[in-house]
Image: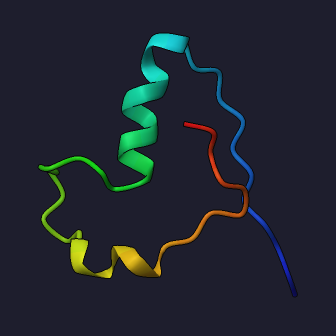
Amino acid sequence: MSYAIIRNTKYKRDNLKGIFRHNERRNKNYSNGNIDKEKSYLNYSLKKPKY
């Protein structure tokens, strides 16, 4: 059985830069110690963002 998770959330324009950095793992420090930044190359986007 296949399924997908879709989240629709409203964001203000001022928050988008921080959200983008978080999602792309471009921040330097995270409160979650389980994040392995060496595996970031395995991440992929279905649609490339416009910077």
Q: Position of residue 48 (x, y in %)?
A: 66, 54
* Residue at (37% x, 42% y) in the render: 21
Residue 13 in the figure: left or right of residue 20: right
Tell me if residue 16 comes above or below residue 31 in the rendering.
Answer: above
Q: Quadrant of the N terminus?
A: bottom right
Q: Position of residue 41 (x, y in %)?
A: 40, 78
Tell me if residue 15 comes above or below residue 45 in the rendering.
Answer: above
* Residue at (36% x, 45% y) in the render: 22
* Residue at (44% x, 19% y) in the render: 15
Toward the viewer: 31 or 27?
A: 27
Toward the viewer: 47 or 22?
A: 47
Quarter-of-image position of residue 42: bottom left
Residue 9 in the figure: left or right of residue 39: right
Q: Quadrant of the C terminus?
A: top right
Is any atom of residue 23 visible in this view? yes
* Residue at (69% x, 44% y) in the render: 7
Residue 29 in the figure: left or right of residue 17: left
Q: Position of residue 29 (x, y in %)?
A: 12, 49
Q: Residue furthest bottom?
A: 1
